[in-house]
Image: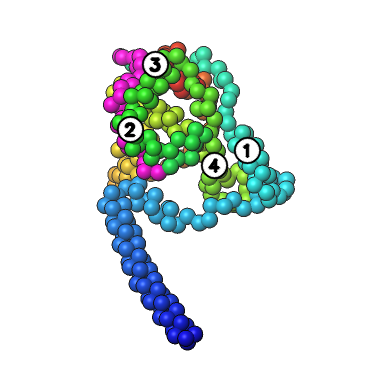
């Protein structure tokens, strides 16, 4: 009787193991098909999608190792690392008011950007374009919630944005952010080789995107950007700049010219932009304080 029971249990176990192997094999096959399809879609898009995919595949462990300051002091715990990185990031932040009384405003726009167009359709379009994932932010509002509830939330969010712009008051939580240290290059133990990535509130990012789109369009329509500027503009990437430069160099060599190239790299460029100069540039471009656009950027 005992022997029959053992044989029965063994048969059941063997059947389950066989079933597991079949399901596991099929799952691996389906995962492989899924990843291949995903890679084919990325390749078909081309451009930055391929570079981003390759970078992600080649990215090594993102854990921050022991940090060492200029006095050769070691920082092991997460709290110690946060403190030393925070001090390093604070050094780079530019919060000085620089005298700009002699600033030459050589561009006088024909029109002014008097307000931000905040229609429900514009907000809905931005909501529907959000990625299908959660988002790390102080307000804990996930992208995917806003995206799939866009029909119900677009009008409410539009009213909130309109109230913020009209009253020139930014919610206090929007002025907070979660800081993620991103390694750039060099020694991973050197705090100077990390730059801060600020993750602001989800709704704040949406309003920022709307303002940035309309401000950029206004500046482009008024030919504010120099024709030699590349980067941060559509269809004018750094790759396009490199191709243009190579063409200029090739033509110069063909014509028998000598070539000298000077490269200037501004360290911590974004972190050291003086806010008062930024606001003055926006004002000179056709938006004057306390215009909503300037107020939004100032806050």
Between residue 16 and residue 107, name the one nearer to us. 16
Residue 86, numbered label = 1
Marks 2 and 3, the one that precedes in the sequence: 2
Marks 2 and 4, the one that precedes in the sequence: 2
Q: What stretch is highlighted in magenta?
A: 110-133
Q: Tell me the distance, in whole angstroms, between the alpha carbons under discs 4 and 1.
A: 10 Å
The residue sitting at the front extreme is 1
- The residue labelled by disc 4 is 180
- The residue labelled by disc 2 is 150
Name the residue at 62% across, 48% down.
190
Q: Tell me the distance, in whole angstroms, between the alpha carbons under discs 4 and 3.
A: 33 Å
Name the residue at 68% across, 44% down.
80
Under circle 2, the secondary element is helix
- The residue labelled by disc 3 is 287
Q: Are marks 4 and 1 in contact (CB under 8 Å)?
A: no
Q: Residue 241's spot in the image, x, y percent?
A: 35, 41
Please identify, in this view, whether the residue under mark 2 or under mark 4 is nearer the observer.
2
Under circle 1, the secondary element is helix
Please identify, in this view, whether the residue under mark 1 or under mark 2 is nearer the observer.
2
Q: Residue 108 is drawn in which quadrant?
A: top left
Q: Residue 244 is drawn in which quadrant?
A: top left
């Amino acid at each position: 009787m005992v022997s029959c029971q053992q044989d029965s249990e063994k048969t059941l176990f063997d059947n389950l193991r066989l079933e597991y192997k079949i399901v596991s094999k099929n799952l691996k096959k389906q995962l492989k098909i899924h990843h291949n399809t995903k890679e084919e879609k990325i390749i078909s898009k081309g451009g930055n999608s391929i570079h981003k995919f390759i970078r992600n595949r080649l990215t090594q462990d993102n854990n921050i190792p022991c940090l060492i300051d200029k006095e050769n002091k070691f920082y092991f715990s997460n709290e110690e690392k946060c403190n030393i990185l925070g001090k390093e990031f604070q050094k780079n932040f530019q919060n000085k008011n620089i005298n700009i009384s002699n600033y030459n405003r050589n561009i006088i726009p024909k029109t002014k950007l008097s307000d931000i167009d905040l229609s429900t359709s514009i907000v809905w379009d931005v909501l529907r374009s959000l990625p299908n994932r959660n988002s790390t932010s102080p307000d804990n509002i996930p992208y995917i919630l806003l995206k799939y509830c866009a029909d119900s939330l677009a009008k409410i969010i539009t009213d909130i944005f309109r109230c913020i712009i009209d009253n020139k008051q930014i919610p206090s939580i929007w002025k907070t952010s979660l800081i993620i240290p991103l390694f750039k290059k060099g020694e991973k133990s050197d705090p100077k080789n990390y730059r801060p990535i600020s993750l602001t509130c989800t709704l704040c990012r949406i309003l920022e995107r709307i303002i940035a789109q309309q401000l950029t369009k206004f500046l482009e329509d008024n030919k504010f950007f120099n024709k030699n500027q590349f980067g941060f503009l559509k269809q004018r990437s750094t790759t396009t700049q490199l191709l243009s430069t190579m063409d200029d160099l090739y033509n110069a060599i063909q014509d028998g010219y000598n070539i000298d190239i000077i490269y200037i790299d501004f360290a911590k460029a974004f972190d050291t932009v003086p806010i008062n100069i930024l606001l003055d540039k926006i004002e000179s471009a056709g938006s004057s304080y306390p215009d909503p656009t300037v107020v939004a950027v100032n806050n």
